[in-house]
Amino acid sequence: MTRQAMPSFLLLLCVTGLRGTTETGSELTELTSKGFFKVLDSGKASFIYFGNAVNPSITLFLEQLEKSVEVLEDYGILVAKVDCAKEKVPTYCTIEKVLKKVYLFRGGVMLRSFVTDTVFDENAIVAHVLFALLFNEVKYVQTPAELQNIEKAVKGRADVVLAHVQALGTAEHRAVMEAAFVYGAEYQFVLTMGGTVLQHMGVEEPGKLSAGLWFLHCKLVSRRWEPCHHSALKKPLSTVQIYTFLKLMDAPLLTEVSADPADVKTVHNHLQSPVLFLFTQRETLALDRSTAESVAWRLRGEAGVVLVHRDHPGVNVPAGHNVAYRLPAEGSRVKYLTLQDIEGVMRLFTEGDRVGLELEEEEEEEEEEHWSVLDILDDEVSESVYRDRSVNLESHLVPALTSQTFSTAVAAAGHTVVLFYNSWDAVSMAFMQSYLEVASMLKDVADVSLALVNCDDWTEVCTNQNASQIPTVMLFNPGERPRRYNGMLGTESLHSFIRLSRMPAPLRLSSEDEAESFLRGDLSRSLSPHTPALVLGLFNSRLEPGCMAFQEACLSLRGELVTGIFAEPQASQWSQQYTASLPALILSRTADSHIHTLPLLNSSTEEVISIVKRAALHPLPELTVLNLPSYLELGRPLLILFVDRDDSESVHARQELSTLQDRGQLDHYLPCWIHLARTPAGRAVLESLLGSVPHLPALVLSQLGSEGEVFLFQALRPLLAETVQRWLSRVQSKEEEPSGVLSDEQWGPPVPLFDFLAVMDEAVPGFAAQRTEEEEEEGEGEGERERESERLELSGALPSLQRGALSFSMLTVKQCNRIQWLPR
């Protein structure tokens, strides 16, 4: 069937001689029995109702059917009826008084029948008929994996138009089907009814979206692991809006001109779409072009973007302005603005009232300048700061400390946790909600209190505590050195650290019964969810070599693990049941109660810490946002099994990997698995590795060699220990083709951490210290050198993994929805 509209006179020629009688003034063709079979023989598509009587409900249906005649005839589809009281068409004319079915034919084949209650009005008729005719061309998807398979199949060849409708037969469904009928040869149309597909497309509240449409730019993607950019239609779904949107998708992403904005004409003018003008000059052309392309991607479908070369002799742009725009309703009139950041530009087209954004209102200038720092942070942090902008920092659970109250608060009995933050720092404010949640979780714990110090106001307190990198969390306990929290900036991680820090490190055991009870977890049962392992050091006496190193290691590991020490004469005899020769370490992993025995002879503190951390790791772990940094430290290629449910196939796959692990055949890899239902970020990881989501469970090998190649264990092979081993051997011998390549981007904080006190001192030397008069009299020279030395020491003290963990902390802000956290 042709996609082109069929002229009315040609359609009339096709049905001449087929028509019997028609009702006066009716456009609905009434066929005779002979005419019906001629329609079938013609090979044309036809939508025909058979009936022999009329009741009120059928009358309403026939009225709607008649309304659809002209529309469907434009698509080359004949709409007709057969009066079974006059014509006896076999099969379709029955003895029933009233028939409630209507049939769609293509040539001599009946494609589908519809109950009249389904095709109840013109929209439903047109939508269902076109949907049935295009059944093999318009794909229907229910999951993101199905959509990604379609993307993968068309990359480099065609773009994808994804439409969401709440129900079939609606006006929106009709608009999409009409567009698919016209543009189906140019684009791959895909239909969905919502669910996880909308979440995959970034819709935060899928239940509130009645209809939507996205254009997936896949045609220009040359590599299958690269994602397709997508642009959303942000207007109601209608035939005109979809037509305009698709035309805008064909328009150039960015237009560069050397002319006054008022004289510039683009396709957007004809399509009644706004135009945004950004200005550049020769010295900053490359940077401005990159910025303009980024803005153009974000505004695609909403506004055209034009980059104007303002230093060209023929261009006359008012001085002091960096942005201009033109609305379709205002002809060639151009409005010039001065905006401080890209978000201000975006709000010109994402908020209804543009007048208030022209910055003629002085009240807005200060607010936009305050928020401009968000431009250099990623969207996750910016969204979190905006979401939590009304957080009450004066909560009674977390009192704000000053220079007068700080010393008294941290000297009080029990454990005092203090957050050092800046109110202007986006990361501090994003973490604030997690900090308050921890305070609420620990409000009934008598010996724990949480507090805040705003380093904007009390810089001397932050300086004295070496809190130069913000945010910083420190735990104070009378009689002990303050401990800095180096974990991730999330609720669960901080809560576990505080809980574990309340336990003595190590817990001193004096009998065999206590040692057995410790390994069973009886002495720390409430802490089992927070500690990955129970670590017990065995010594003949406290004077034994290595005992001191072990105790120092336990202090360093405090807040991460529960540790104990059994340093008594009977420890040697008791340890024989574990085949341990003293000094030794016995480790019991809480996840599987597996016991490890490790020697500690002549081990230094650093070696003990390394031994304990490695032994505490699960041999076949489930990767989560919290534990990923610990496993990345091992530096081994990741052999990841991706699953999305706990069915027998997924469990069996894990068992096969465990078999290989037990045989020692995976010692050169880090075998692990990710449950996409529990760790949604895993789906983004899989997409970044392969470019799409394959059939699950899927086994992927990544971070192999210097080229960052990614290999997918093909689903056609049975996922058995032997086949996996042969596959790994083929990968090592370069007989397997990679399924993707990781980019060279390194994961880390969205912006570099910086010593804000040093920045303040650089602007005004000595200002950040806020020294007292007595200190000033001691001489500025010596004090300045000491402070500079201290700052240099602090800037180099933070391990690289801690810096990287900051980017992971952002995952806690939005439950790991879409951050790719498996870098090369």
Image (cartoon, rainbow, N blue to C red):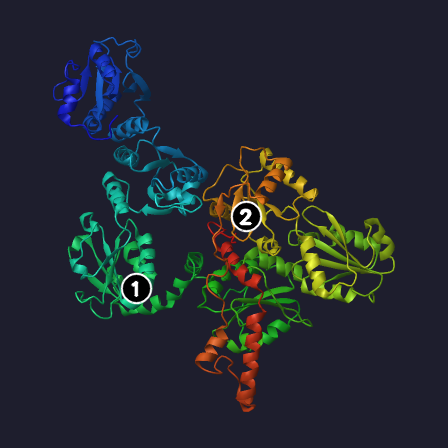
Asked if one can make out residue 183 in the rendered structure from this viewpoint, the answer is yes
**Residue drawn at 38 percent across, 41 percent down:** 155
Q: Is residue 205 above or below residue 334?
A: above
The mark found on residue 475 in the picture is none
Query: Amino acid under label 2?
Result: Ser
* The quarter of the displayed image where residue 700 is located: top right
Q: Nearer the viewer, residue 114 or 719?
A: 719
Asked if one can make out residue 392 in the rendered structure from this viewpoint, the answer is no
Cα distance in 3D space between marks 2 and 1: 38 Å
Disc 2 on helix, strand or loop?
A: strand
Q: Is residue 693 above or below residue 57?
A: below
Query: Amino acid under label 1?
Result: Leu
Mark 1 Cα shell of 10 Å, populated few (<14), some (14-19), many (≥20): some
Residue 449 is situated, as x and y percent measured from the top left of the image, at: 60, 65
Q: How many marks?
A: 2
Q: Is residue 7 above or below residue 378?
A: above
Q: Which residue is mark 1?
A: 285
Question: Going by the image, does 276 lie left or right of 405?
Answer: left
Q: Which residue is mark 2?
A: 702
Q: Nearer the viewer, residue 304 or 500?
A: 304
* The quarter of the displayed image where residue 37 is located: top left
Q: Is residue 545 above or below residue 212?
A: below
Residue 535 is situated, as x and y percent measured from the top left of the image, at: 73, 56
Q: Nearer the viewer, residue 749 or 739?
A: 739
Residue 522 is situated, as x and y percent measured from the top left of the image, at: 74, 51
| Quadrant of the drawing holding the N terminus | top left
Residue 564 is situated, as x and y percent measured from the top left of the image, at: 75, 59
